[in-house]
Image (spheres, coloured by chain):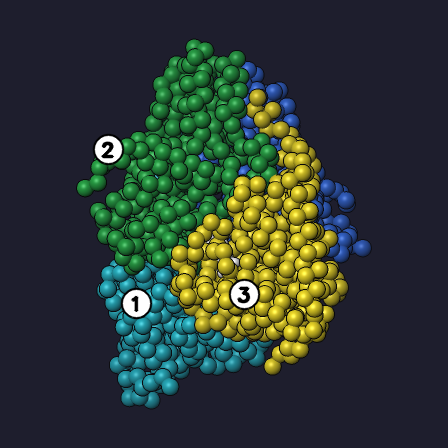
Chain colours: A green, B blue, C cyan, D yellow
Amino acid sequence: MNAPLKKITFGQAFHMAMDEAMAADERVILLGEDIADGQGGGVYKTTLGLSAKYGDARVRSTPIAEQAIVGAAIGAALVGYRPVAEIMLMNFITVAMDQIVNHAAKLRFMSGGQTSVPITIRTISGAGRGFGGQHSDMLEAWFAHVPGLKIATASNPADAKGLLLSCIEDDNPCIFIENTPTYRTSGPPPEPGYRVPLGKAAVQREGRDISVIGYGRPIADALAVAGKLAEEGISVEVVDLRTIAPFDAETVLNSVAKTGRAVIVHEAVKEFGVGAEISSRIHEELFRDLKAPVARVGSRYAPVPFSPVLEKDWLYSQADIEAAIRKTLG
Amino acid sequence: MNAPLKKITFGQAFHMAMDEAMAADERVILLGEDIADGQGGGVYKTTLGLSAKYGDARVRSTPIAEQAIVGAAIGAALVGYRPVAEIMLMNFITVAMDQIVNHAAKLRFMSGGQTSVPITIRTISGAGRGFGGQHSDMLEAWFAHVPGLKIATASNPADAKGLLLSCIEDDNPCIFIENTPTYRTSGPPPEPGYRVPLGKAAVQREGRDISVIGYGRPIADALAVAGKLAEEGISVEVVDLRTIAPFDAETVLNSVAKTGRAVIVHEAVKEFGVGAEISSRIHEELFRDLKAPVARVGSRYAPVPFSPVLEKDWLYSQADIEAAIRKTLG
Amino acid sequence: MTETNVDKDLLLDIYRRAWLIHQADAKFRAMITTGQLQILYYSPRGQEVVAAAMMAALRPDDYLVTIYRGIHDQLAKGIPLKELWAEFAGKATGTCKGKGGPMHITHPETGVMVTTGIVGSGMPIANGLGLASQLNGDGRVTVCCFGDGASNIGAFHEALNMASVWKLPVIFLCQNNLYGEHTPYAMSTGAERIADRSISYGMKGVRVNGNDAAAMHAVAREAVARARAGEGPTLIEAMTFRFNGHLLGDDSHYIPKAEMEAAKAADPVPALRRTLLETQVSEATLAALEAEITAQVAEAAQFALDSPYPDLRENRIDVLDVEMLDNREIAA
Amino acid sequence: MTETNVDKDLLLDIYRRAWLIHQADAKFRAMITTGQLQILYYSPRGQEVVAAAMMAALRPDDYLVTIYRGIHDQLAKGIPLKELWAEFAGKATGTCKGKGGPMHITHPETGVMVTTGIVGSGMPIANGLGLASQLNGDGRVTVCCFGDGASNIGAFHEALNMASVWKLPVIFLCQNNLYGEHTPYAMSTGAERIADRSISYGMKGVRVNGNDAAAMHAVAREAVARARAGEGPTLIEAMTFRFNGHLLGDDSHYIPKAEMEAAKAADPVPALRRTLLETQVSEATLAALEAEITAQVAEAAQFALDSPYPDLRENRIDVLDVEMLDNREIAA
Ligand SMILES: Cc1ncc(C[n+]2csc(CCOP(=O)(O)OP(=O)(O)O)c2C)c(N)n1
Ligand SMILES: Cc1ncc(C[n+]2csc(CCOP(=O)(O)OP(=O)(O)O)c2C)c(N)n1
Ligand SMILES: [Mg+2]
Ligand SMILES: [Mg+2]
């Protein structure tokens, strides 16, 4: 046995989750472009070594054909497999929407529960690295609007591992979103056997004055802002959804019921984003308790620009989160 | 000249709009499955006669290949044409998402304004006719979340004509959504030359007590409910967005500022739908003026079921609108 | 050359399946035209023998993926008639409790895994079933049915290429009825023959007269054998015709009269019946078989009409694996 | 047989374009490795002659649609070097004001209409450009470049079929460098030769050694003539290789050493230079031409470095045709 790691990156967390899932369950198979060892174990090396360990039959490098990749995952899932399909970057998921939305999400319902589609689609995105307009979009809001799918993303490596394992073990189709800019960011590893239950948010920092609600990369920003504001005596609670849809309304509403104020943050474009649903739900259910309107922070209403100065301006920032908190505190 | 029609259906309105646009501008061309006369002029006969009038070169029946249809429209638009591409049913747009989202929506921005993509994508959907899970979805919320697209839909035939003409004449890519169940519903025709400006909502009925905000088919339901409640002395204002994105916040906010109460209704699934954005904006900007939380009415969080009893239960209804109004009135 | 000798019992089996399709189709159309059923209906009339001869080459546990125009495939595969009928009627006793409807028939017990309404989308999923069989080593074969028009969409290309590269046990059965909705083959398809598209994938491709039971079955049997032996997929282009247009109600105005008449003159079901009579099957045997099936069809139709509609709770289950809250209650 | 006689001036023109690509690529790589530019870079090194010979067969007003690995196509088509460089650097003086970046170069004045980062997606758009030319009757030709891997995705299939059925003046130029990212040709592609896929569309298809300037140009010229004459599209499979892996930084570990060495030994740029020397072009002529280009490249690189970044207002324009409100201000 190797000595346990002191820190792991997000990338290592994803790798560990798939490794454990494959070791535990023969029905777990991986499909995606370049994912087998002969092809380098994935563009981010997230699957490196897995084909050596579990065989090329279970870890399959595919043609560049996202409809075929997702379709193959769906078909195998219908008869008992638990495929993990990798869509190299989230923008490429646009070519596989039919398979995901019209099929993966609906087959359980349309078959009256006779079949189910326990697939996990891993994909990655996020702006800030100069990848430009077609390689940086966060599209989780689309999938959240599709009944029959679960959408998850993690804000730290430990959760990343526990959440991906939960997705693979879940009986529903899951979209698991990874983040490009933080792929090599590290954090403490989870305990062995750790799982993040789907549909459960986590309070990552307790606070009294205001709730910041988000998921994925902005959680670290929210925690940084919370730390800074604590020095001024402002007590910020940070709620990490982890499962974006269906989301944990109970934890969110409990937090805001306590603080009376909320800011929602995500890196996707603000308009018609996930934040709108969360904000609406909070207003609907806690209208009388709210001391101020819920604020939303997101990125600009524009394609992701290439030029570094524009990209920085486009993306949500800690300054935006801080400004929204201060404004909401009044 | 024929005598002017007393009433026109939605279908006729779409037909008239395309006919007028083609007559006025040679750069308007139509692409879609079965749309030329030899193939019957479209499944709903919306383009019948246009290929005879303007030639098969300008009205093109295509292979079943939605990526190729939208791509051809984009390419022609880049060099000056104004293509109208028909995607037979909205669920089929899932196979063309890459072309629409990564290309049509972004090429103006990514080219720094050197090119533009003045296409109109006509598509149709709506539940209530037993078309089942893959032929009934309303997906407008996805497109509303994509910067660079305009999304429009009409609640009456006159607007349908004026709005479709505006889309075709607009310099941006527009998604124009038609409604299956009301395709043969009729209403007064518009004046010649009538246009519905993009980005402008219409107050379809004035009222004092509460604003119902929606678009497309539910507007007729909202008006019916408003008529009914008027008998009880409840005065309902009905705001028809017409352009779903970017939407006319000014008209919406003015209405709610006046009434202090709002219900939003759409036929898409409620969760993470367009209603969430509208609701959030209203709460954010009119928090102090609101007498009650903004309510949302939408369809159930499930795929569209086939069985008529289930489909009816799935779909939003006038009863839902009425209940939401009463609850919001307290 | 493909071996086309097919024995009498087999032909009779194919006829039994074809007649079942023929009768079910007639009854569906009658019920729809009289208003007893209100559904979109894509008649398979004219394509019976393609399905009957194909499915007669399969084991019961082989998989089928098909499309909106799929009752011929489903019935030939052995789906129970009553549950199928009840599903078309949106009843709780349907294969899918009425939730899927005619375009979304699933019945895993008879291998009917997916019925899709999105052109081309069944092919990628069929690969996944084939992949599972390959991994299991269970020798199962997946048949994926689609039309000529579907061979022009992207999913076809992606799926056939992957199937070939991975040598999946999948049979791609293109039922070429020469029209996609109202558009004729040549207007939409660059290839002279769809079977030739197999060259793009290094796959075996065959064109066959799908209305000829013996020829169709021989091609099917060979493809099944290849798949079971791990030798990979086959693209079969079965030439056929549809007699009732795309959707019931379509008057086929876009089909030249002579073309339609020639097709009807070659109607595969009576043709197969004549062949059987010629090969020493008695009129009495056929009549008895036909009567039995006709009675079963009537019974199934009645069963569907008599069955109850599903409970509204069905809208909250099978969305995910847990019951959903009522989102109206959340709002109200 | 394709006529492969190409005259000296033409070969020199092709060499000029190829050398420009070669030098620009060298300079880009140098700037990236020294940290002067921080970008994803897909080197076209090894594929220079394919692009140079193809674009030398075009008129300036013909259209080009290409991909992330596209500077060879763009430079050969005549895009101005300074603006291209500035776009790579994200500067206001770039072709797209820095908003598109390396993967999204557009420059309509030289016919560079779209550069896409989504595999396969350029082909449907190229059809639209071809459709416009067909409707206009302006004789313009559209060249659409893509890789071997891209020939396995659905958009390829849909687009080539439509182009053929509509006889569009589009040339589909597949630059077969035998790898898609890290996956070798045979592992992902069922067809023996991509050119054979043209059979699926009833389209003319040719495989050619893309590194042979004369052969490549002859095939290109023929395809251009066919397109201009209204005789429809061509699929060209130009065999080539990429020397610097998929993305700069990729160590090509997945490429057998012997394969890489053989490819480098057949390096098309020095090979073309040798041919020119053999065909009575003097060393001095070549050296002068090379020096001039090298100077231009240095100047363009400096121009890019010296140029200003775009104004932040750019994030609010070109989204739609009107300026957007600042959504931060709405929130705050
Ligand atoms: C992606 C997609 N585009 C369009 C349609 C509409 N549509 C339904 S069936 C059909 C024709 C299909 O023709 P073909 O594949 O030949 O099958 P056939 O109906 O003749 O059996 C079309 C265009 C669809 N269902 N899905
Ligand atoms: C739809 C889509 N899937 C995956 C990718 C990721 N990707 C970028 S380039 C590439 C390889 C393409 O190979 P090929 O077409 O041979 O072109 P080459 O890079 O060799 O020039 C892949 C898989 C993408 N950009 N788009
Ligand atoms: Mg057909
Ligand atoms: Mg390649």
Q: Are marks 2 and 3 on the same chain?
A: no
Q: Chain of mark 1?
A: C
Which image quadrant is residue A194 in? top left
> Residue D299: x, y in percent?
69, 47
Residue at mark 3:
D267
Does B232 appear above or below C160?
above
Question: At numbered mark 1, what does the secondary structure look like: helix, strand or loop?
Answer: loop
Disc number lying in front (1 or 2):
2
Q: Nearer the viewer, residue C262 or B178?
A: B178
Q: Residue furthest top?
A: A233
Q: Which of D70 and A279 lies nearest the eye of the viewer?
A: D70
Q: Position of residue C303 (x, y in %)?
A: 31, 57
- Who's the residue at 29% across and 37% down the image? A162
**Badge 1, how many Cα within 10 Å: few under 14, some, many 20+?**
many
Q: Nearer the viewer, residue C70 or C258?
A: C70
Q: Is residue A314 above or below residue D44?
A: above
Whether ligand 2 has any atom under 8 Å from the Cβ at mark 3 is answered as: no
Q: Which mark is residue A191?
A: 2
Residue C141's disc number? 1
The residues bearing labels 2 and 3 have C-alpha atoms spaced at a distance of: 54 Å
Point 32% across, 63% down: residue:
C130
* Chain to which the residue tagged by mark 2 belongs: A
